[in-house]
Image (cartoon, rainbow, N blue to C red):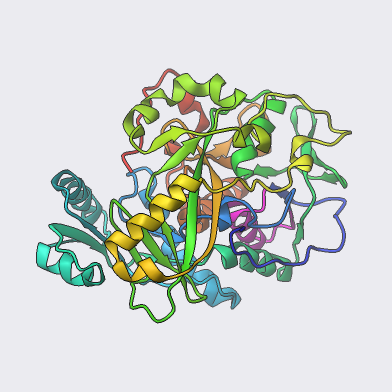
Amino acid sequence: MPAPLRFIKSSPELPAEADAVVIGGGIIGAFTSYYLAKRGFKVALVEKGVVGGEQSSRNWGWCRQQNRDERELPLATKALDLWQAFGEDMGEDTGFRRCGLFYVSNNDEELDTWARWGEYARSVGVKTRMLSSEEATQHARFTGERWKGGVHSQNDGIANPGMAVPAVARALMRMGSSVHQACAARGIETAGGAVSGVVTERGTIRTRLVIHAGGAWASSFLRQLGVDFPQATVRQSILAVGTSGLNLPDAFYSKSLSITRRDDGCHTLAISGRAKVDPTLQFLRYQSKFLPMFKNRWRSLSPGGLHGLRGRHEGMTRWTLDGPTPMEKVRILDPIADPKTVRLTIERAADLIPALGSVPMVAAWAGFVDSTPDGVPVIGEIPNIPGFILAAGFSGHGFGIGPGAGHLVADIASGQTPIVDPKPYRLSRFSGGEKIDVSEF
């Protein structure tokens, strides 16, 4: 069964021109469009499938600072305030709430890692505290286990992945911009080397500013423009169970299982970091750049199957602007949840929280998480294509930091002071001989 998602109606007509065209209707593209519209831009958001249809509706929904890489933490901190402000300003419900996040562990090494991170985080104003064994056991009393310790991030929270992107898209249209679903962007047009338009399957939109926030499709699209963007996807599986009447927290992490409350009487269950690697031609091309990451995370990764090839998002083909592209043949990446992972998740849930052993599974789904070699996104201008900005490779962290990332892109596009320093997100870090510093989390 697919991940839950609220659907919206598209704008009636494709505009002939726009101040900016945003390619990709996920959380990054939606918030980028929103913050550009707030600056007075007339924006056209184009999406080959439906807004929020891929990884933006298939994730945990955590909006966290806790255990963020130092390079992403500033965006995560800003994003929390922006999540809250969006709902207050636009009256749209994204399901966001600052419920706090609880992590527990019986592993000394894991606890030491959290403690070291906490020392740094508190130095930059993040509220996080380590939990004693007694505190962790009390907070996780629903497990019936005794825990060595844990961590509580008081200001962090969750939002609803099935509601968030549609809510932002609705707000965008109320502000006078437009949203176009089932409208794949095939490529761009240039004049004098700079962006002059976006060619879609429904026609060309004249514009001098393009933001590509196409998630797992970004590298293939950039290849058509002669831009090398190392990207690989992994397939993660998640499931939802009916938990009405059970006293479970909004969000909880342990090494064996993570749980998140939804707004429909269910919780989602997942195993953190566990993923399948589905080989593709693009993966083979960039495998050397990803070796440091796979070396660090090999315990959580395992070989997959043909799902990546079927998705066509990591092909090496070149396409033309006057004919259908792979994006029009596969409107929505909807890979099958890995049966072994689903079974293991159910088993772990029953072991950790016995009450979950008798609840029904409502749905199970999977998504392709687009990653960079260091696990940190690329956000910034493409120097040899003036007017073109890339925002992709969010490595499973894009939902939570989405408002912050969208704000940063809008800052760059409009020439305003960036909300955070954009230097850590430059694409050139993968081509200048720099050492790849893989994110610890």
Is residue 78 visible to the viewer in this orientation of the structure? yes
Return the residue nearer the eye: 331 or 68: 331
Residue 281 in percent (x, y) is at: 61, 23
Q: Quadrant of the C terminus?
A: top left
Give the percent coordinates (x, y) of residue 426. Answer: 49, 34
Task: Judge whether residue 370 is colored magenta.
Answer: no
Which quadrant holds residue 300? Answer: top left
Foreground: 147 or 128? 147
In the rendered image, which quarter contains the N terminus?
bottom right
Q: Residue at x 85, y 55 (%)?
A: 14
Q: Residue furthest front?
A: 358
The image quadrant that residue 191 belongs to is: top right
Give how far across and how far down residue 310 sits, in percent: 67, 35
- Left or right placement of residue 140 versus residue 79 in this view: left
The magenta stretch spans residue 34: yes
Q: At 24% from the left edge and 64% from the top edge, which residue is drawn?
A: 152
Direction from residue 441 to residue 185 in the image, left or right: right
* Vertical arrangement, residue 286 with respect to residue 406, above or below: above
102 with respect to 286 (left or right): left
Residue situated in front as seen by the camera: 357 or 387: 357
Residue 185 in view, yes or no: no
Q: Which residues are magenta?
A: 24-45
Q: Position of residue 167 (x, y in %)?
A: 62, 68
